[in-house]
Image (cartoon, grey):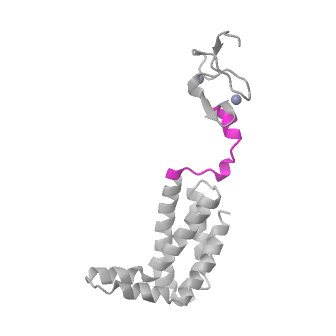
């Protein structure tokens, strides 16, 4: 191994003995990352990944939060305003939430985002339809919250709504 002095490609003022294992350009230790196939510069390390499916945990949490707010507000709007027609419009609800998730995630896709979309739609639809009833019971200090859960559990229309909306929503981030 030669000990000739090299200079980092990104920091020409730093000397180094290391090279990227792929492009073989010299880099300092700060510019190299350890990968399963050895040291790589950041450029070469990133090419291996499929960036469209890569979502950080922080980003996923943010996406889920935004999706949840949109889903609950949208759910209240659908069940409170659209009411009886909401089942016919359930794909629209799902697509809307899916689209919010996709844009918040910088138009990425993948299983994590599908899960986030499904979660937001299920919670949003249930809270949209029964959230206000729950809140008023809570505000009244009632101990009959179980009644709302029971009503939601027997609500075939809500289940249909959720299933159609989830299928539509997930298709946006698949
Ligand atoms: Zn490289
Ligand atoms: Zn460097």
Q: Position of residue 36 (x, y in %)?
A: 66, 37
Residue 142 part of the magenta-drawn span: no
Residue 51 part of the magenta-drawn span: yes
Which residue is rendered at x = 61% and y = 33% of the image? 34
Q: Position of residue 154 (x, y in %)?
A: 50, 90
Which residue is rendered at x = 52% and y = 58% of the image? 63
Q: Position of residue 11 (x, y in %)?
A: 59, 20
Instruction: Answer with the quarter of the image where residue 156 lies.
Output: bottom right
Quadrant containing ligand 1 reads top right
* Extreme-right residue of the structure: 23
Instruction: Answer with the quarter of the image where residue 19 lies.
Output: top right
Which residue is rendered at x = 65% and y = 62% of the image? 173
Q: Compared to 18, does 97 lie above or below?
A: below
Instruction: Answer with the quarter of the image where residue 172 lies.
Output: bottom right
Q: Compared to 22, does 151 lie above or below?
A: below
Q: Position of residue 171 (x, y in %)?
A: 67, 68
Task: Give the residues in magenta.
Answer: 41-58
Q: Compared to 119, does 10 lie above or below?
A: above
């Amino acid at each position: 191994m030669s000990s000739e002095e090299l200079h980092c490609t990104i920091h020409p003022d730093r000397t180094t003995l290391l090279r990227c294992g792929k492009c073989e350009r010299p880099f300092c230790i700060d510019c190299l990352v350890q990968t399963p196939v050895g040291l790589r510069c950041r450029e070469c390390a990133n090419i291996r990944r499929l960036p469209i499916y890569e979502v950080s945990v922080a980003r996923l949490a943010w996406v889920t939060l935004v999706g949840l707010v949109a889903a609950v507000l949208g759910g209240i709007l659908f069940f409170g305003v659209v009411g009886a027609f909401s089942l016919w419009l359930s794909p629209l609800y799902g697509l809307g939430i899916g689209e919010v998730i996709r844009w918040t995630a910088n138009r990425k896709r993948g299983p994590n985002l599908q899960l986030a979309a499904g979660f937001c739609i299920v919670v949003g639809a249930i809270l949209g339809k029964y959230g206000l009833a729950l809140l008023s019971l809570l505000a009244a200090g009632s101990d009959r919250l179980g009644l709302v859960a029971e009503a939601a559990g027997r609500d075939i229309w809500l289940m249909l709504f959720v299933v159609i909306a989830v299928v539509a929503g997930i298709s946006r981030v698949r």
